[in-house]
Amino acid sequence: MTLDGAPRQIFLAGQWRDAADGSRFGVQDPGTGQQLCEVSDAQDADVGEAIEAAVAKQEEWAATPPRERGEILRRAWQLMTDRADELARLMTLEMGKSLEESKAEVTYAAEFFRWFSEEAVRIDGRYARSPAGGGRVLVSKHPVGPCILVTPWNFPLAMGTRKIGPAIAAGCTMIVKPAQLTPLSMLNLAGLLKEAGLPDGVLSVLPSTSASRVVNPALADPRIRKLSFTGSTEVGRKLVEQCAPNLQRMSMELGGNAPFLMFEDADLDATVKGAVTAKMRNNGESCVAANRFHVHSSVAGEFTRQLTEAMSSLKVGHGTEDGVKVGPLISAEQRDKVVELVEDALSRGAHATTGGKALDGDGFFYAPTVLTDVPPDARILREEVFGPVAPVTTFEDEDEAVRLANDTEFGLVAYVFTRDLDRAIRVGERMATGMVGLNTGLVSNASAPFGGVKASGFGREGGAEGIEEYLDVKYMALSLSGTP
């Protein structure tokens, strides 16, 4: 699929169409700052039709055999795998990440479809004898109902498949609101699902310049029974309030401020490699990106030296260029936020051992950066930087490391590097996070439950737990006459 062939209309209940009033908005290449194309801008009337379509199709779709739902997902996985290069190039053009990163995301995104194709046939319940002996307990699981799914710009395919996969497997209809900055990947995914045999009415994809225009009417309608949102904690709090009147189910994957702990006995080479992975995946624009590097004082100097060398060697450029490891940030606004956070740290006494500035030229580039001597009051230790910046601080013992790691309102992921297995488990269990990477800088896995605690949200995506977010539990009491 080339850019010229990529869908640019609304996908409403299985059909491609222009917005109700014909309006469109531009999609930008962050590597050049230039407009790539225009996409239909969903309006109120389109949202209303999508809601009606999802509600009308729900009962029929829920009754579809689980194997049939699973086979649709399996075919979609195969289509994504076969067209990985095309999907990756489209993603790079609209989001900026390197082709290498985009190809990795396509593989990761497709895996959610394969995983949930297998989970679709494993939705089970239980049958038990009542403890009193005179009856039976029958427990079954059923699709929660029509859903509204809101995805972010940083992983425009994977954040979609991670929500759409379990919804399809569970038997839920859905409306997807993709990020305004990256709608092309999601629209292309809708086309692949239609090709894979997804019935009309199960899925609508509504790109729009106004998220509230799509989300607010859906949450105001009591027939929409679930919201799944990936985005900022600030927006997530508002959406929780909006779900309250109709008591809709919610999955919230919100902001992060991931600590990266290196103890004195850690393998230095492996730790630096893990640090680059944890920090620089997706240009650092990831909720699970390492945001604060807490290193034991006895090894901090050598760790910083090697991390500086590794970060400064990364090739920066347009994501389509050969050998590029670091693409542009998503927008001028995002680049300006990174600039602001780094300048705040430098003004408070931090030092940049490499980078520390935005790069000249077209696009929204920021140099890979390592900061040392970062004071505790620097904003960059409190706020999610969402860019290629690694601030390094030190600690003296295990208790201090844990205290520093947990000193945040967020709790998505933490990274712990040590050769001591006892310490790894002990510290991992003390982390106030939903996920922990032990001697690895990569925790994302379709077969594992992804999610956080505290201000990082609630609910889980992926793993056996992921489909449970789209299922309601029903209990039926059976009274049997003539039984003991």
Image: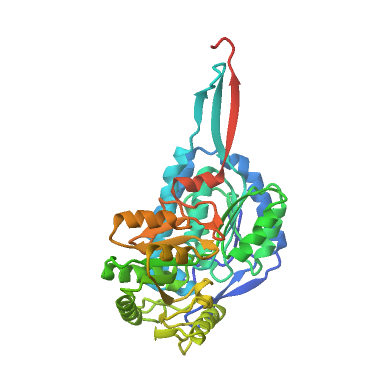
The image's colouring method is rainbow
Measured as percent of width and height from the top left, residue 189 is found at 49, 59
Examine the rendered structure and indicate whether residue 451 appears above or below residue 41: above
Residue 78 seen in the figure: yes
**Quadrant holding the N terminus:** bottom left
Quick check: 335 left or right of 276? right
> Which residue lies most toward the bottom here?
360
Q: Would you identify the image quadrant in which residue 383 lies?
A: bottom right
Measured as percent of width and height from the top left, residue 136 is found at 55, 21
Camera-nearest residue between 450 and 360:
450
> Which residue lies most toward the top here?
482
For image coordinates 72% across by 60% down, the residue present is: 45
Examine the rendered structure and indicate whether residue 392 appears above or below residue 15: below
Camera-nearest residue between 428 and 217:
428
Measured as percent of width and height from the top left, residue 477 is found at 60, 24
Camera-nearest residue between 473 and 51:
473
Quick check: 160 left or right of 317? right
Give the number of callouts. 0
For image coordinates 48% across by 87% down, the residue present is: 362
Camera-nearest residue between 375 and 219:
375
Residue 84 seen in the figure: no
Q: Would you identify the image quadrant in which residue 63 lies?
A: top right
For image coordinates 72% across by 54% down, the residue present is: 220
